[in-house]
Image (cartoon, helix red, strand yellow):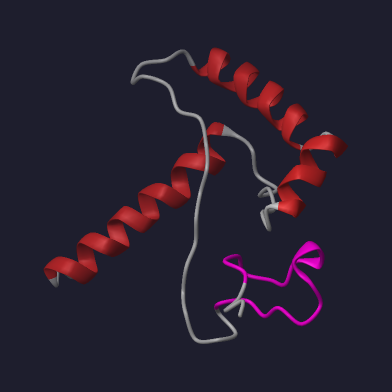
Amino acid sequence: MVLGVTISKRVVGAGPDVPTLAERGFELDAWYGVGGVRGHAHVTSSISSGQIAKLTWDLSTLDRLVALSREPLPSSTPDGFTNPIKAEIDRAILKNFGAEIE
């Protein structure tokens, strides 16, 4: 039995009757990315990001991702990758430590 796919919407490659885990009441996200060391030049990050985006959106790569029930995010900039992670860390800190933002 397949419980569901782990992304936010149904995936054609998983089968038409396979729901998302969210449809079953679960909340789950997985992120993949490439990072560099602190102080890495912004121009180098932008060039690398552009090259990775080009590979990610290549049809053969997309076919592989669909086969794995994965889907790339539209944002493939350095900020587009780090901002959601920072927001998730902030949310986890607030939730786990009961802190409030004033």
Q: Residue at x 46, y 51 (%)?
A: 84
Q: Residue at x 47, y 80 (%)?
A: 26
Of the pair 64 and 94, the residue shown nearer to us: 64
Residue 8, given in percent of the width and then of the height, sits at 62, 69
* Residue furthest out toward the bottom: 24
Q: Nearer the viewer, residue 23 or 95?
A: 23
Where in the figure is residue 98, as x and y percent of width and height?
Answer: 14, 72
Q: Main secondary structure of the magenta part?
A: loop
Check the picture and name the quadrant holding the C terminus: bottom left
The residue depicted at 37 percent of the width and 48 percent of the height is 86
75 vs 45: above or below: below
The residue nearer to you, when weighing 93 against 6, is 6
Q: Nearer the viewer, residue 39 or 65?
A: 65
Q: Is residue 101 left or right of residue 26?
A: left
Q: Is residue 51 magenta?
A: no
| 85 sits to left or right of 52 | left
Q: Give left or right: position of 11 versus 93.
A: right
The quadrant the N terminus occupies is: bottom right
Give the magenta range.
5-21
* Residue 13 part of the magenta-drawn span: yes
